[in-house]
Image: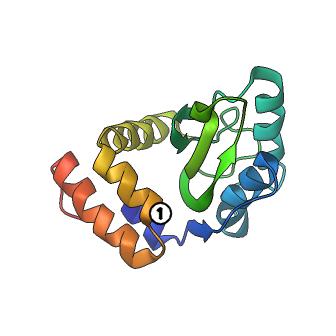
Amino acid sequence: MLDEVIKNQRYSFHEGFDSWQDSIRAACQPLIEKGAIESAYPEYIIENVNEFGPYIVIAPDICIPHAQEGKGVNETAICFMRTKVPVNFGPAAEYEARIFFVLASTDNEKHLANLSSLVTLLSDESVVDAFIQANSVADLEKIMEIEGEYLGTTN
């Protein structure tokens, strides 16, 4: 999963954002630039959060922005973003996020494989901390070595 993020330059690092909406747009930007999603995709995510609440914040510090399969999506892809200043999605601390994994899907099987890898990787607090501290591609490459250990692969 991370090898795809790195190889396709689908990552970004930021200081902070004025709003959660701006964070969603920034998190999606590498996918827009690479043509994996349309420019409307982040707006679909924002509409969903406005309607259903901050369901995309799956745990403290972890956000997985996504919208309906195929809507504004050209290819199944994943993108990573880290922000130093937590983004507030709601009134409680569990609605703050610093690491974002944008998911876009046209292929349900590949999408589920990405999601499964992501959940496995993020189940380890030390990995989450490594993502929070990441400032460069070199940092992501170190985490990719850990991912290989978790998934029994070498990347």
In the displayed structure image, the side of residue 86 where residue 71 appears, left or right: right
Displayed quadrant of residue 35:
bottom right
Residue 98 % position (x, y): 57, 52
Displayed quadrant of residue 97:
top right
In the displayed structure image, the side of residue 110 where residue 13 appears, left or right: right
Where 123 sits versus 27, above or below? Answer: above
Q: Nearer the viewer, residue 20 or 110?
A: 20
| Residue occupying the point 83% across, 44% down | 43
What residue did someone put label 1 on?
5
| Residue occupying the point 38% across, 37% down | 119
Q: Nearer the viewer, residue 3 or 36?
A: 3
| Residue occupying the point 71% across, 69% down | 33
Q: Quadrant of the N terminus?
A: bottom left
Q: Residues within 10 Å of mark 1 (few under 14, many from 20)?
A: some
What's the amino acid at mark 1?
A: Val
Residue 23 appearing in the image: yes
